[in-house]
């Protein structure tokens, strides 16, 4: 049997009882380590689970799925995923490959940022399409995600922005030499995401008299959701670019212009310098 097991968001104890029982019985257990991170060390996880974990990086997950699935028809093999197994589309491919090979499978669900984001008080059914904000570099500055934020705002819906992480990313130089060397891990902060959004807003203003977002638009910054050190801050887009929420992982929300009174009341506790009752930017 092949098992795809969600670990939740907080720490080693967020795995479900069912998930933990399966982990203890498997012949091999892989830990997917590039689409998200858990707030604890590999050593702590191995001690709590009572068994060694095989690290599955981007190359293994995206190109070595057959290696992970090998033998799963005769013994139990598990892939552990931070959050919920279907929080990243990459993991769907494992189920398709298992079916092709006639390998039985089971998915053990858990909390993910997609539903835990309700901790800020915004109602989940009022969220539109989720977007990912990638790191920019000197030659690559994609902004297509902005159009999705714009569409959500026009339909009076909230936007969850998932922020980029870079784990075990090869350096451009090493790719040219065909000998992989890796950049240090990077995790985008809400301040970095806000700065990139403001750059896009300024460009849109110059080109098309943008009226969807401006530097006074409201946004919600969240850090380490589900962990004991969780933080939530409500600020303007301008203020968020100077906000330090500490270590990863961060998420950013662009709320709808019109919010339910309960949403406003709940958000107000995180907005130190803004009165939200009549805020509309």
Image (cartoon, rainbow, N blue to C red):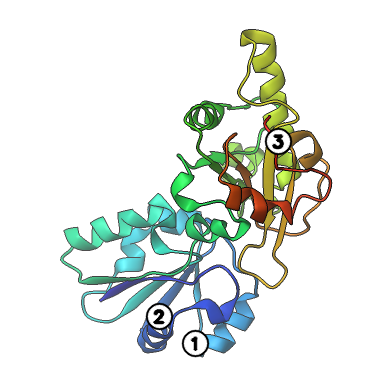
Indicate the quadrant where residue 10 lies.
bottom right
Report whether 197 appears left or right of 89.
right
Distance Cα–Cα, label 2 vs label 1: 14 Å
Q: Quadrant of the C terminus?
A: top right
Q: Tell me residue 262's x, y (percent).
A: 59, 53
SS of the residue under disc 1: loop
Q: In this figure, which residue is indicated by the disc labeled 2?
A: 19
Q: Tell me residue 129's x, y (percent).
A: 45, 39
* Dot 2 or dot 3, earlier in sequence: 2
Distance Cα–Cα, label 1 vs label 3: 52 Å
Indicate the quadrant where residue 257 lies.
top right
Q: In this figure, which residue is indicated by the disc labeled 3?
A: 279
Indicate the quadrant where residue 75 lies.
bottom left
Report whether 95 appears left or right of 116.
left
Report whether 187 appears left or right of 23.
right
SS of the residue under disc 3: loop
Q: In this figure, which residue is indicated by the disc labeled 1?
A: 51
The local crowd at label 2, few if under 14, some if 14 to 19, many if 20 or more residues have their Cα within 10 Å, is: many
The local crowd at label 1, few if under 14, some if 14 to 19, many if 20 or more residues have their Cα within 10 Å, is: some
For the residues carrying marks 2 and 3, which lies nearer the camera in this image?
A: 3
* Dot 1 or dot 3, earlier in sequence: 1
Q: Tell me residue 124's x, y (percent).
A: 48, 52
* Dot 2 or dot 1, earlier in sequence: 2
When the figure is inspected, residue 95 is found, relative to residue 73, above or below; the finding is: above
Residue 137 appears in the rendering: no
Residue 205 appears in the rendering: yes
For the residues carrying marks 1 and 3, which lies nearer the camera in this image?
A: 3
């Amino acid at each position: 049997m092949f098992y795809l097991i969600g670990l939740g968001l907080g720490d080693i104890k967020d795995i479900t009882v069912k998930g933990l029982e399966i982990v203890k019985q498997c012949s091999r257990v892989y830990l997917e380590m590039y689409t998200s991170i858990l707030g604890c060390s590999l050593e702590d996880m191995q001690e709590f689970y009572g068994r060694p974990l095989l690290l599955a990086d981007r190359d293994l997950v995206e190109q070595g799925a057959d290696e992970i699935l090998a033998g799963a028809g005769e013994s139990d093999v598990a892939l552990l995923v931070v959050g919920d197994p279907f929080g990243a589309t990459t993991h769907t491919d494992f189920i398709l490959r298992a079916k092709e090979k006639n390998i039985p499978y089971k998915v053990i669900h858990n909390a993910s940022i997609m539903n835990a984001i309700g901790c800020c008080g915004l109602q989940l059914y009022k969220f539109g399409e989720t977007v990912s904000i990638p790191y920019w570099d000197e030659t690559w500055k994609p902004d297509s995600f902005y159009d999705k934020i714009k569409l959500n705002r026009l339909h009076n819906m909230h936007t969850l922005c998932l922020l980029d992480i870079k784990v075990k990313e090869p350096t451009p130089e090493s790719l040219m030499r065909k000998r992989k060397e890796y950049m240090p891990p990077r995790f985008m902060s809400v301040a970095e995401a806000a700065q990139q959004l403001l750059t896009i807003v300024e460009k849109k203003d110059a080109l098309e008299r943008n009226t969807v977002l401006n530097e006074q638009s409201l946004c919600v910054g969240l850090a380490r959701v589900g962990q004991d050190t969780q933080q939530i801050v409500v600020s303007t887009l301008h203020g968020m670019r100077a906000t330090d929420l500490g270590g990863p992982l961060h998420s950013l929300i662009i709320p709808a212009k019109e919010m339910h009174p309960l949403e406003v009341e709940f958000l107000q506790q995180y907005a130190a310098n803004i009165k939200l009752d009549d805020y509309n930017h």
